[in-house]
Structure formats: C-alpha cells, structure tokens
Image (tube, rainbow, N blue to C red):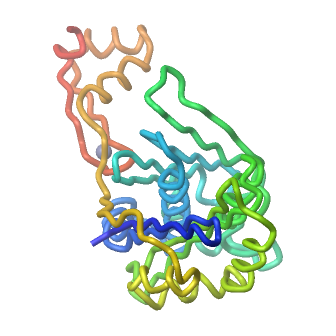
C-alpha cells in the first residue's frame, strides 16, 4: 500500500513527512512505458510534488511541471485528494543518446535549460503559480532550490527511485524536513547532525518501511500527526475530454462535424481511450 506519514517535533521545531508510492508508481511506469532513466525522472517528480503538497495547508491540487529541454521532454506530476499521477513526454528515448561527457545521465534526461513550475490550487479562482530555473536537472536539488526561493531556506527535500534489473520499481519514496517558523539555530544544528548527508538519509529510507521508527530516530519526541493511504488515480473524465476538443478551435471542430468523424482522445496520464462521436461534438 502506498502511504504518507507526517510528524511534528515540538522540541526541535521541525515537521517531517515521508511518502512511499512504490505500488502506484509501478502501475504508472507500465502505462507510460518508460525506460529506467525516464522512470527515475518521473518518479522523483511525482514524489517531490506529493511531498510539497502534503507539507502545505489548504492545497487542493498541486502540479509540478518540468521542462528542461532534456531527452525526456516535459514531465508533469499532479497531486490531488491523496491521489497522484504523472506523465513524461518521451518515456522511451534512446538510451545511447546519453553522453558521458555531458553530465549525469539524469540531468540529460531532465535537461537544465528551463524551469520547474509549481502550481498550487487552493480552490480560489486562479491557482498560485511560481517557477524557478532548473539548477541541476537532478530534480531533488531543483525542488530544494524551489523551497529556498519560497522562503523555506532551512527545509530539506529528497526522493529516490530504485529500479530493479527487470525495470520494475523496487522502491519509490521521499522525505521532506521543514523547520517551523519559530525555529532557532540550535534546532538546525541538531537536525543537521542527526540527518547527516541527504544521500545517507535517502539510503536509510530505501532500506526500511518502518517510517515511524525512522522519524523517531531523527527526533525522539516526534508525534505522528497523520498516517494515510496514497493512491495512483487519474482524474481524467469525459468533461475534460470535451474541453480538450474545444481547444482544437472552430475550424477544426467544424471539419470533424462535417466529416462525421469519430474522435479518439487518449489521456496522457493513464492512457485511457475516449471515443467521442461527431454528433456529441456538434451538441
Ligand atoms: Zn486519465
């Protein structure tokens, strides 16, 4: 079961959240037919986006959009009502396009010439959109940079996706550690000492599913605020499909109606096929 856990340490003025989406992300990579590098890029984006969403109050829908001109193309992750979904434009690019001298493989998949855009929908009319330049194309550092730019200078975010020899997801999980507004220097020193390097923390995360114990290892006094199930679920429906057909423009729609064609629309996220009759479009 995919899950999230959130905990608070009052003594150390810190909030810690962990998500594990191993099960649902396995479904996603089967649907998206990703190669192993695309799986890692997409997984990290979905996990970090979920962590960001869970770390904020009053977020109805959180969307992260990465476009760094890399081999994978655009990557989108969405989190809404404890459900996540994701999409990568080029899921199965040729691995031999990765060049050793051009930096890490992942940074070539994501690219560095572009932005990470985060959109927070709080049920107000306009979502709150902010974007930062990509700094590494490794996704984790890019989300960290996003946190810095959103005035959460002392927060840490990291995710990891482990793919086995058969291309299946062995583990897909991540952690966010946020200092509360009242924190003092001592709290930061304490966390830094406890956590050590982020790499080390993520390795620990891969090895366990006892996340409560892991959190208590960092902060003994931490109280669990919430443990809950997360799910991969697509939010596509026929209304959204009709809206996307409307976007084709008057000319194109007229042509479809005149020719009496059936329009097939495939959801980018779950690959579900919607067949819409031209009479329905005419209505
Ligand atoms: Zn869908």
Residue depicted at x 38% and y 80%: 168
Quadrant location, the N terminus: bottom left
Q: Position of residue 108 (x, y in %)?
A: 70, 66
Can residue 167 be seen here? The reply is no
Residue depicted at x 32% and y 58%: 232
Residue depicted at x 43% and y 49%: 79
Q: How many marks?
A: 0
**Dividing the picture into quarters, in which one does residue 224 lie?**
bottom left
Quadrant location, the C terminus: top left
Tell me if residue 60 comes above or below residue 91 in the rendering: above
Q: Position of residue 115 (x, y in %)?
A: 71, 46
Left or right: 35, with 194 as reference point: left
Left or right: 223, with 105 as reference point: left
Q: Position of residue 179 (x, y in %)?
A: 67, 62
Left or right: 16, with 199 as reference point: left
Residue depicted at x 53% and y 83%: 220
Can residue 259 be seen here? The reply is yes
Instruction: Tell me the quadrant of ligand 1.
Output: top left
Q: Position of residue 103 (x, y in %)?
A: 79, 73
Q: Name the residue nearer the viewer: 64 or 32.
A: 64
Q: Name the residue nearer the viewer: 161 or 150.
A: 150
Residue positioned most to the front:
11
Q: Name the residue nearer the viewer: 80 or 116.
A: 80
Tell me if residue 46 comes above or below residue 208 in the rendering: above
Q: Name the residue nearer the viewer: 131 or 54.
A: 54
Tell me if residue 69 comes above or below residue 11 in the rendering: above
């Amino acid at each position: 079961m995919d899950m999230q856990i959130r905990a608070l340490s009052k003594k150390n003025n810190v909030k810690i959240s962990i998500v594990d989406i191993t099960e649902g992300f396995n479904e996603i990579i089967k649907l998206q037919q990703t190669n192993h590098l695309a799986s890692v890029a997409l997984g990290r984006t979905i996990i970090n986006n979920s962590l960001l969403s869970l770390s904020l109050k009053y977020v109805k829908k959180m969307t992260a959009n990465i476009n760094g001109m890399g081999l994978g193309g655009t990557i989108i992750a969405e989190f809404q009502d404890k459900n996540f979904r994701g999409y990568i434009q080029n899921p199965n690019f040729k691995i031999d396009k990765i060049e050793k001298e051009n930096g890490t493989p992942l940074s070539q998949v994501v690219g560095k010439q572009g932005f990470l855009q985060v959109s927070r929908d709080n049920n107000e009319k306009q979502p709150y959109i902010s974007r930062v330049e990509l700094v590494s194309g490794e996704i984790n550092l890019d989300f960290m940079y996003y946190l810095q730019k959103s005035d959460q200078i002392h927060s840490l975010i990291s995710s990891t996706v482990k793919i086995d020899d058969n291309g299946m997801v062995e583990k897909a999980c991540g952690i966010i550690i946020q200092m509360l507004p009242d924190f003092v220097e001592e709290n930061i020193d304490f966390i830094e000492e406890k956590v050590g390097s982020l790499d080390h923390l993520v390795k620990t995360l891969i090895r366990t599913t006892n996340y409560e114990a892991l959190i208590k290892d960092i902060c003994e006094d931490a109280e669990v605020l919430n443990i809950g199930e997360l799910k991969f679920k697509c939010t596509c429906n026929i209304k959204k499909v009709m809206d996307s057909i409307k976007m084709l423009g008057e000319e194109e729609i007229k042509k479809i109606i005149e020719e009496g064609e059936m329009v097939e629309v495939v959801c980018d996220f779950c690959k579900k096929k919607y067949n819409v009759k031209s009479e329905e479009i005419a209505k």
